[in-house]
Amino acid sequence: MIVKIVVLFLVAMGVMAMFGKLRVPGADRLAQARCPKCGRFRIGKGQCPCGHIGKGKG
């Protein structure tokens, strides 16, 4: 009985590990939408509220 519980636990942990390795679609695009200076999300191509201008410039 204990062996069955341990095996089920290990299988469940393996399934969780597989789901943990999955990448969220659009995660890299979402990371690029952040301001490199302050980390806030930028909408559009305009200036960030912190004063940082555009991507990679500032």
Image (cartoon, helix red, strand yellow):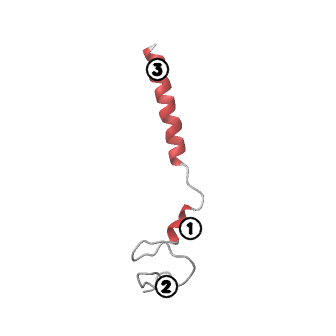
* Label 2 neighbour load within 10 Å: few <14, some 14-19, many 20+: some
Q: Which mark is residue 44?
A: none
Amino acid of disc 1: Arg
Residue 43 % position (x, y): 55, 76
The CA distance from mark 1 to mark 2 is: 18 Å
Name which quarter of the figure residue 26 lies in: bottom right
Question: Which residue lies under the disc numbered 3?
Answer: 5
The CA distance from mark 3 to mark 2 is: 56 Å
Question: Which residue lies under the disc numbered 1?
Answer: 29
* Label 1 neighbour load within 10 Å: few <14, some 14-19, many 20+: few
Disc 1 vs disc 2: Cβ atoms closer than 8 Å? no
Residue 50 is left or right of residue 42, and the answer is left
- Depth check: 6 or 41 in front? 41
- Depth check: 58 or 50 in front? 50
The CA distance from mark 1 to mark 3 is: 41 Å
Q: Residue at x 56, y 67 (%)?
A: 29
Question: Which residue lies under the disc numbered 2?
Answer: 47
